[in-house]
Amino acid sequence: MKYLGNQEFAEFECSHCLKNEAEREKIENDLITIYNSKTWKVYLFYRKVKNLILSIVAEISKRIVNIFLLLKYRFQNRVFYEPDFKYTTRSPVHYLLPSASYEPKISVIIPHFNQSNYLNHALKSLKLQSYQDFETIIIDDASSKKSAHRVEALVKKYKCKLIINNKRKGPGHCRNIGINQARGKYILCLDSDDVLPNYSLLEMVVTLENNPCYGFVYGNYQYFDYKNYLEKRQKYNFYNLLKENYIIVTSLFQKILWQECGGFDEDMDGYEDWDFWINLGKNGWYGFYLDRVLLNVRIKHKSRNLQAIKRNKVLIEYLKEKHKDLYSKNNISKIKKIWK
């Protein structure tokens, strides 16, 4: 084996480095040539367009899946049955002029505040109901002039009754004054941005007519718009109701219960419907659960429900203080034994 001396090794290392440097420069020049070529620019453009198309396809696929899920839930809950119930011989309320002698079976109460863009959808869903023996009362809670003009046009179009508040007083107050002027035996509170499936009124009124021992009827609901998913509820249990508000405000109840048990708490800015269901339960009026989608609830980025959730602790403390006779340790344990 031949060993290199220091001088020979240095010459060898220098020549080797020069060789590597020349190869590296050649590679860099080749890469620069490639990067500046039209072929490479076309490839980059193609890759950018491809990634954009893939992202658009992914977003469209996601939306299509959500639409199909929503259609699936609506289709599953659209099975119509023919109950042993006589339909009214009256013409649909929407095509009748207001009359002092007319007494509908149901009064639909709609509080409204600057939601005229959505109110048309709610009223249209009422017009398409398979059960038409009802009146519609809209309470405008001091909306803007532009929104108020739109509401007036919708009132004329759908033959509704309109009540106007000069100052904003909240949905609890609006529901109370609307119910106070309602002529129906049953009351349904509907938010101005929600939509009813076309079978909802029929299903609910038939249930209460055939089960008069129950005070109200409620069911499942389908979220749509910002979020799309089905919200299934549970069978009525008063003990569980004290822990969680699982009954939505759009539930059909007898007007006489509102008179007997007190209306909606106007001091509450959220969860006033929960307080109302608790009041009914305290007075022995329980709910009937229909395992059906009875309401389509619009979810927006900013909604009153989301704001109420943020104030969850404050509102629950208010409820417990208001109903401290129910939430005391002794009474809550007794209620638990009864309903468990």
Image: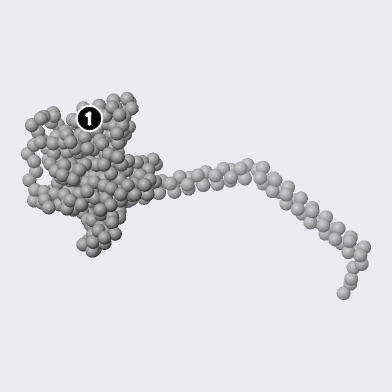
Residue 148 placement (x, y as % from top left): 29, 27
Of 147 and 269, the residue lying toward us: 269
Amino acid type shown at disc 1: Ile
Of 257 and 230, the residue lying toward us: 257
Q: In this orientation, does residue 133 appear?
A: no
- Colouring style: one colour
Q: Residue furthest bottom?
A: 1
Residue 233 placement (x, y as % from top left): 27, 54
Residue 307 placement (x, y as % from top left): 37, 43
Q: Residue at x 22, y 30 (%)?
A: 163
Q: In this orientation, does residue 176 appear?
A: yes
Secondary element at tag 1 = strand
How many dots with numbers?
Answer: 1
The residue beneath circle 1 is 163
Quadrant location of the C terminus?
A: bottom left
Of 16 and 100, the residue lying toward us: 100
Task: Say if 236 sits above or below 41 in the image.
Answer: below
Q: Residue at x 87, y 62 (%)?
A: 12
Specify few, some or many for label 1: CA neighbours under 10 Å numbering under 14, 14-19, or 20 or more: some
Q: Residue at x 30, y 55 (%)?
A: 243
Residue 21 placement (x, y as % from top left): 79, 53
Quadrant location of the N terminus?
A: bottom right
Q: Residue at x 18, y 43 (%)?
A: 258
